[in-house]
Amino acid sequence: GESVGLHLPTLSVQEGDNSIINCAYSNSASDYFIWYKQESGKGPQFIIDIRSNMDKRQGQRVTVLLNKTVKHLSLQIAATQPGDSAVYFCAESYNDYKLSFGAGTTVTVRA
Amino acid sequence: DAGVIQSPRHEVTEMGQEVTLRCKPISGHDYLFWYRQTMMRGLELLIYFNNNVPIDDSGMPEDRFSAKMPNASFSTLKIQPSEPRDSAVYFCASSRTQQGNYGYTFGSGTRLTVV
């Protein structure tokens, strides 16, 4: 029968390649954004954040890009590894401590 | 630090029973959040506390749900009576007020199944 529920975008990437995960956020007034990684059976884990006064921020093997004009956020993972296989969520916040989460993207790394 | 600790990890209960989920936030964190995750709706914020005081409970689905934070190191989420549609993974997260960064730390979650 037909499956009901969120249809998460998926990304399949070859080990060693770079990954780009995209997110469209909803509130043009949001001023703080976070990427989380969730592995099976675990809670979401903080990866990297960015404030709206920036358009790029780099971490270890990860880079977040923010385009406020089109309300778009992306996460780039360099040299993707098998341990990067997970569901990735973007989250946004406006002027308080509540985070609204996107639906998530499932990333599968091929050996 | 042991991180955010939730118990139990799994809970199976019969419809109509009371269920209590527990959370111990990271020491020193002054914000605590309860989220629910389902395939249908993703991650939803139910309620959050600041310094043990409930700030926003607009995400609590109905009166069957209640949450308390009697002290800085403990919070409970109670469902009474439970229904099959409450089946989900419930996450607790905590955060510390900190200039420029208030990313949450999540616990491992409680998988609730109501039959």
Image (tube, rainbow, N blue to C red):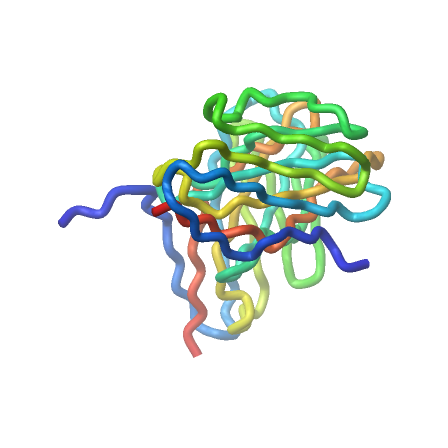
Is residue A70 something one can see in this rendering? no
Q: Quadrant of residue A79?
A: bottom right
Instruction: For residue A9, say whether it is visible.
Output: yes
Q: Residue A43 placed where, x, y %?
A: 58, 53
Query: Which is nearer the eye, B100 or B37?
Result: B37
| Residue at the image point whose x is 57% and y is 60% from the top | A77
- For residue A9, side relative to residue A54 (left or right): left
Q: Is residue A64 above or below residue B52?
A: below
Quarter that holds the C terminus of chain A: bottom left
| Residue furthest out toward the bottom | A111
The residue nearer to you, when weighing A53 against B63, is B63
Quarter where residue B94 is shown: top right
| Residue at (34% x, 47% y) in the render | B115
Q: How many marks?
A: 0
Position in image of residue B111 (x %, y %) = 48, 52
Q: Is residue A45 left or right of residue B31?
A: left
**Looking at the picture, how far across and down is residue B102, in whole percent?**
74, 38
**Would you place residue A64 above or below residue B30 in this image?**
below
Please report the residue visible at 53 percent of the width from the left and 37 percent of the height from the top: A101
A35 vs A18, nearest the viewer = A35
Left or right: where does residue A57 sit relative to residue A109? right
Residue farthest toward the left in the current orientation of the protein = A1
Residue A87: x, y in percent?
A: 48, 55
